[in-house]
Image (cartoon, rainbow, N blue to C red):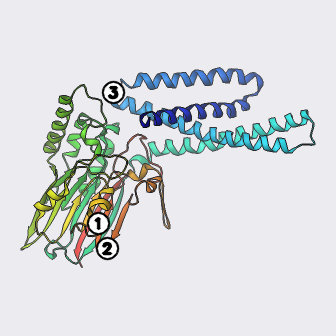
Amino acid sequence: MRHFLAPIIFISLLLFSEYFAFRGFRLLFGERGSRVFTWAWWLFFAFEILLFIISRSWENNARNLVLNFIMILFVVKLIAGLTVFIGDIVVWVRTLADAQASAQAKDSVSLSRRNFVGKLALGISAVPLLSMTYGIVRTAFDFKLHRETLRFPNFPAAFNGLKIIQISDIHTGSLVNTHQLEKAVELILDEKPDLIVFTGDIVNNRTDEAWPYAHVLRRLKAPLGVYSTLGNHDYGDYETWSDAASKNRNMEDMYRLHRELGWNLMLNQARTFERNGEKWSLLGIENWGANLNFPKYGKLPIALEQAGDAPFKILLSHDPSHWNAEVNEEKTDIDLTLAGHTHGFQFGVEIPGLKWSPSQYIYPQWAGLYRKGKQLLYVNRGLGCLGYMGRIGIRPEITVLEFFKS
């Protein structure tokens, strides 16, 4: 039953939004115009459905553009439909309340009120239309550098001033061309980091989505190297494969991709860095998620064993829910965890004094820096997009971390 619940809810919302948005907008065209509008509306709805079905076999970029076009229309009509639905209830109650009025007067007032509701729905629905379009055209690749200076009593003084850049969730399957990614790479290289880390989700579904962008990502270099982990989208779990061998080949292709990029893929492993007799350890595990049935491939104990007695530890773990489940409250001696995954929902508000996103209702730690006791977590807002090819209020992020001994 659970497998059918989501489609049932979606289809119900789709029909609800279509019907009530149609009712609201039809009133704006008069009696003669409403007949033409009715035909045009439902023919266009049929065209949307046909386009959605046909586009499933199209190449990635074209399919993404079509899906985002349909998604924006759905949100616009849903907002308009809700406005009309609530307006209908208000009009009905107000009309009933006019008990002394004649039936003709009631009809006249009701029509006037419904016309107002139609205009209101048109005005309100323009907000998501404009904001979602702006989010695709402008905000989706308006990269923001988030800077944090971190001080730890056990950080090795020999590495004072260490600069690490974290990126996450590139989702190459949602990119249309290389220009946006080239811009991000330039911003990263301009920072001259000592170390670059990537915390998972280089693709949406399949490894072959990333190969057209490999020549751009290969430019990422740092003196101490580039280290990476896998996210939940990197395993091919969301793709329909003809057989198990095809999925295995996709996974082998993912490993080869990281090698050819020159990235050190960490699969439940640790790497210790040493300078002047002082050392620290970088750990990286496979995806491990505590929420929403996300896969638990990561094996933190194996990486911890490899890290040994390093006095300072940084963990790369794609899903921030892993921090609460296995890392913090002194379950381990990991000082800092770097995660991604949430994208900040690609929608929210971040202004001085107010930080909000729907993501926070699923992930208590959804963007930025968090602390519990002596342990810290940083959640990167993601470099790319998934689903909706834009961002509203939550800009794509490049994290710049500088470390010092306190």
Q: Do labels 2 and 1 touch, CB within 8 Å? A: yes
* 130 relative to 111, above or below: below
* SS for callout 2: loop
Q: Amino acid at mark 2?
A: Gly
Q: Quadrant of the N terminus?
A: top left
Circle 3/circle 2 CB separation < 8 Å: no
- The earlier-in-sequence mark between 3 and 1 is 3
Residue 155, position as x, y percentages in the image: 19, 74
Residue 332, image x, y percentages: 22, 66
Disc on res. 328: 1
Work out how far the residue at label 2 is from the one at label 1, CA to CA, in angstroms.
Answer: 8 Å
* Residue type marked 3: Glu
Amino acid under label 1?
A: Asn
Let me know if residue 222 appears in the view. yes
Quadrant location, the C terminus:
bottom left
Mark 3 highlights which residue? 59
Number of residues whose C-alpha sits closer than 10 Å to that of mark 3, classed few (under 14), some (14–19) or many (20 or more) = few
In the depicted structure, whether residue 377 falls above or below residue 82: below
Kindly report which numbered mark, 3 or 1, lies closer to the viewer in this rendering: 1
Image position, residue 359 (x, y; %): 44, 53
Task: Give the residue displayed 26% in from the left and 35% down from the top.
Answer: 206
Residue hosting label 2:
373
**Residue at the farthest left position:** 277
Question: Could you say which quadrant of the image residue 375 lies in?
Answer: bottom left
Report which quarter residue 64 is drawn in. Answer: top left
**Of residues 125 and 332, the one drawn nearer to the viewer in this rendering:** 332
- Nearest the viewer among 346 and 236 is 236
Element type where label 3 sits in the image: loop
Name the side, left or right, on which 12 lies relative to 307: right
Q: Earlier in the sequence, mark 2 or mark 1?
A: 1
